[in-house]
Image (cartoon, rainbow, N blue to C red):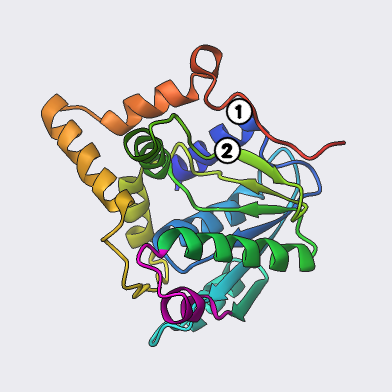
């Protein structure tokens, strides 16, 4: 956990993610990323310079066989309140709308529902489990599919929802998350989404792998350093915060 906590502290101190008195909702899908984020933040609150509270929130997608009871037990173990709410997002995306490219709509609906539920539970911030590789893949997708340089921000205030979204794991490699989740015995819940592995993001993972093999180096880390160089490239310089 030392590397995980170190990366979270780096992100927090560099971009001012967590402030004293914050109540942070962690979006818990049950996957390895969100489960490690939840577990790490539960530890991080013990020595963070700014005291904060946590709540874990899961939006059920109504896929057969998805059981979050072990997640509830884990939250009790790490002393984090847990809220589970079933949604009809799967039915809207796949059955009603029959989306050919469902990921964008699904993500939009899940974000909206999570932000609303977090605010209803008194949370002013929502923590998402995006990691270093997500940052790089999003950057490459915007470049290769949209002809622009765009990526999500470490900190974003959403005025309509009145919550601030933070991404504390932006410096943490996915390969470390896989190892940490296994070593900690995290109760990961498999998501049987029919679009899994067939997305543009999955293709970007292949692109990064090809670059790694060709250059024999950690390409994702090189790209992230350029993104994080806000003085020169201005990609993460405009952090959107709630007005005082």
The Cα–Cα distance between marks 2 and 1, rounded to whole angstroms, is 10 Å
Q: Which residue is mark 1?
A: 14
Where the C terminus falls, by quadrant?
top right
Residue 165 location (% of width, % of height): 64, 48
Residue 90 sits inside the magenta stretch: yes
| As drawn, 239 above or below 204 | above
Identity of the residue furthest to the top in this view: 232
Residue, x 37% and y 62% (percent of image)? Answer: 101
The residue furthest left is 214
Query: What is the span of residues highlighted in magenta in the rendered image?
Result: 87-102
Residue 191 % position (x, y): 37, 72
Report the residue at 57% width, 79% height from top. Answer: 87
Looking at the image, is mark 2 or mark 1 earlier in the sequence? 1
Is residue 63 visible to the viewer in this orientation of the structure?
Answer: yes
Q: Is residue 184 magenta?
A: no
Callout 1 crowding tier (Cα within 10 Å): few <14, some 14–19, many ≥20: few
Report whether residue 121 is seen: no
Measuring from the top left, give residue 119's x and y in whole percent: 76, 62
Kindly indicate whether the residue at mark 1 contacts the one at mark 2 (C-beta within 8 angstroms): yes
Quadrant of residue 134 within the rendered picture: top left
Identity of the residue furthest to the right in this view: 244
Q: Which mark is residue 154?
A: 2
Q: Residue at x 33, y 50 (%)?
A: 201
């Amino acid at each position: 956990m030392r590397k995980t906590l170190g990366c979270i502290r780096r992100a927090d101190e560099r971009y001012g993610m967590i402030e004293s008195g914050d109540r942070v909702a962690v979006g818990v899908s049950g996957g390895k990323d969100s489960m490690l984020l939840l577990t790490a933040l539960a530890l991080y609150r013990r020595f963070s310079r700014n005291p904060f509270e946590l709540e874990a929130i899961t939006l059920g997608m109504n896929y057969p066989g998805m059981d979050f009871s072990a997640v509830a037990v884990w939250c009790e173990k790490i002393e984090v309140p847990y809220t589970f709410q079933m949604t009809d997002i799967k039915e809207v995306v796949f059955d009603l709308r029959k989306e050919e490219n469902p990921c964008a709509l699904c993500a939009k609906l899940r974000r909206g529902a999570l932000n609303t539920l977090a605010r209803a539970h008194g949370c002013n911030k929502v923590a998402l489990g995006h990691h270093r590789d997500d940052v790089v893949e999003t950057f490459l997708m915007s470049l290769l599919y949209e002809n622009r340089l765009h990526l999500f921000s470490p900190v974003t205030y959403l005025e309509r929802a009145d919550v601030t979204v933070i991404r504390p794991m932006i410096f943490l490699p996915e390969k470390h998350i896989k190892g940490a989740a296994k070593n900690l015995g995290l109760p990961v819940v498999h998501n049987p989404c029919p679009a899994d592995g067939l997305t543009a993001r999955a293709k970007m993972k292949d692109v990064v792998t090809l670059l790694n093999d060709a250059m024999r180096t950690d390409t994702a880390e090189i790209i992230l350093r350029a993104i994080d160089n806000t003085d020169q490239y201005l990609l993460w310089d405009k952090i959107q915060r709630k007005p005082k």
